Image: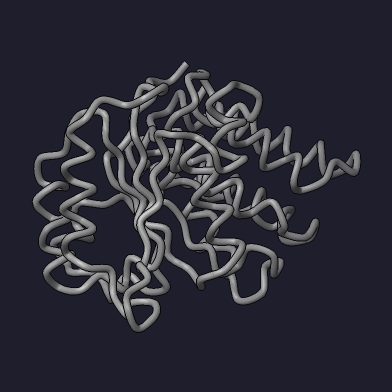
Amino acid sequence: MAERRLSHAYMLIGPEGPARDEAARRLSAALLCPAAEPPCGVCRDCRKVLSGVHPDVIAIGRQEGDKGLHREILVDQIRAAAADAAVAPNEAARKVYVIAQADRMNAQAQNALLKVLEDPPGHACFILCAASAGALLPTVRSRCVRAADTGDMGAGAAGTELPELVRGYLEAAASGDTAELTMFCMLRMKLDREDTEGFAAGVKAAVCDMLCGRRPDMGLGRERLFRMAALMDKTEDYLRHNVSPKQIFGVLAVETLR
């Protein structure tokens, strides 16, 4: 089993809406789930996170003021979150702070967040949801792992080139970060069968090139590359037996880092 490595900060980049909200919930569950292959979806932490009632998942968004909803996330909100992050979790091993519309943080708020990201409490994780990474300060972006893009979720593979999918999968596998890989796979579960076949073939071709020395192995190592080639063979066999892309990406999320 590959060692589970987690970051203290992630970015979820994509249009605001149900897909991004669901991705944030899934990533939060993966960060709190104690299972070896998170999120398991059945433990107490997963069930509470996915139901929106976990006390260690804290949502930060624009607040109501005297004149209605504030246009920005304010610095006092981030300072309050930073103070709360210093307090131990209630139930889980970590606390997760989900900043919806992180691109609405004003400059003061982003700089306050930067201080936390530079020296985070060991049990605190932050998820920044934004329509565009460019709206976040470069110093904030540099301290976050880009978990996935959410714009293609629910829309099939429209606008998504297969080489980009292949690269994204290989980078997630090379990171060794279970949460990042889980999010990549979850967000591709609505690919159609044809594009899933192309994805598997593209991964096999890239792995073959790495094994033959035609391209760098991205730090995957020969043993991992051989396992990935076998996993793509299994993927193609599943497709021949009419296993759905959703099930296939579920398998990849579990087996890639084994």
Residue 213 against residue 89 in the figure, above or below: below
For residue 254, what is the image quadrant?
A: top right
> Closer to the camera, 140 or 32?
32
Q: Position of residue 148 (x, y in %)?
A: 46, 56
What residue is rendered at 33% in x and 65% in y?
102
For residue 253, what is the image quadrant?
A: top right
Q: Position of residue 240 (x, y in %)?
A: 87, 43
In the rendered view, does 61 fall on the left or right side of 15?
A: left
In the rendered view, does 112 fall on the left or right side of 238?
A: left
Q: Residue furthest bottom?
A: 67
What residue is rendered at 20% in x and 28% in y?
122
Residue 230 against residue 213 in the figure, above or below: above
Residue 206 against residue 54 in the figure, above or below: below
What residue is rendered at 73% in x and 40% in y?
248
> Closer to the camera, 169 or 155?
155
What residue is rendered at 58% in x and 22% in y?
44
> Closer to the camera, 114 or 236?
114
Q: Position of residue 160 (x, y in %)?
A: 59, 70
